[in-house]
Image: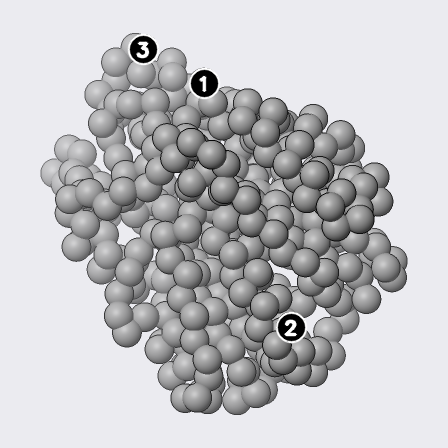
Amino acid sequence: MDIATASPPYKVIQSYAANELKKSMGGNAVICRLIDMAANQSGIDHRFIVIQDGDENSTEKFFTRGGNHFSPDTKTRMEEYEKWSVELTKNAVKDLGEKNKIDFSSIDRLITISCTGFFAPGLDYELIKEFKISPNVKRTNIGFMGCAAALVGVNSVWEAMKQNDNENVLMVSVELCSLHLQTEPTRDNILANMIFADGAAAALFSKRTSLEKRLEIQFAESFLFENSAKFMGWKIGNNGFEMMLSSELPKIILNSAAPKAKEILKQKGFDVSQIKHWALHPGGRAILDSLQNGLNLSDEQLKPSREVLRNFGNLSSVSILFVLKNVIDNQSFQKDEFCCAIAFGPGLTMELVLFKVV
């Protein structure tokens, strides 16, 4: 497996984002304190977004008209989604192709992933056309499964390669969370606006292509926590998509998800202490703290996840691929070491994938 990523051109500093959110939410003293608290506790220095609102010098704003806050309808937001999702995924796939000298006509399966927008024909069509992928390529689209979706994709890769281990699989994920800014001054909106960001990633899974560092999927598991739908949700509104994030999530991850992850690994014959490398979804600083404490991991093992959070924010489904790329690019691999990836999605669901260095 190898991964390439792409980020949009507009970099927003967390302090600037907080000040802009205060203005759009009305400047109430209590709301301002909540925004500052969310910004200061996020573990994020800066993020990248597809809208110019984060650029202090820009005169064009997506969410401002005539100096006043403006909330575009869902159609307008989806038009921006179509434009930027195509551009970013093409950039990621092009980078991956050049790095690995991919013959795109040899791609047998194409998996596209996103939960922040829709259009049809979609990303698969655009990528097939751009890179001259075979019109016979098997296609799968994974939509609206939140931050866990890329590991759902890896699970699909694993299932496909168990049936035919000679398949070349291209998996692409893109999320444009900034297009769904909501300014009703609620806790959920404040948290979402202060942590989510935009980006894309492309991953190649192959036994036919020579990759410098090889992570081979050992197994992929999913788990749905009972009576947990209220803790994370994602609805389509008239003015973009509306996020629901419970303040209970870090506690649930510490008390329920971490023990379940240990149990899954134990059932497969592994102890946490046997796993050197970890790719944990950077949903926020408190989420990573809960995983670190619940799994008894070192600061070094959390470094890839915390670096991605600090420099890119929470990219929803794309985040785990950014973290895996960080692990692949920066960790010192030894043959037969293991890397465990964990992410969470609405449900509440947990996706866990174990890789082996080969």
Residue 306 vertical position relative to residue 147 in the rendered view, above or below: above
Alpha carbons under labels 3 and 2: distance apart: 54 Å
Look at mark 1 in the image and give the residue it sits on.
37
Apparent side of residue 162 relative to residue 225 in the rendered image (left or right)? right
234 or 189, which lies in front?
A: 234
Residue 315 vertical position relative to residue 142 in the rendered view, above or below: above
Which of the 4 image quadrants contains residue 95? Answer: bottom right
Q: Position of residue 73 (x, y in %)?
A: 15, 47
In this rendering, does residue 105 appear at all? yes
- Classify mark 3: helix, strand or loop: helix
Q: Position of residue 68 (x, y in %)?
A: 15, 33
Query: Few, some or many C-alpha atoms within 10 Å of disc 1 (few <14, some 14-19, many ≥20)?
Result: some
Query: Few, some or many C-alpha atoms within 10 Å of disc 3 (few <14, some 14-19, many ≥20)?
Result: few
At label 3, the amino acid type is Val
181 or 207, which lies in front?
A: 207
At label 2, the amino acid type is Lys
At label 1, the amino acid type is Met
Contact, CB < 8 Å: mark 1 with mark 3? no
Q: Which mark is residue 162?
A: 2
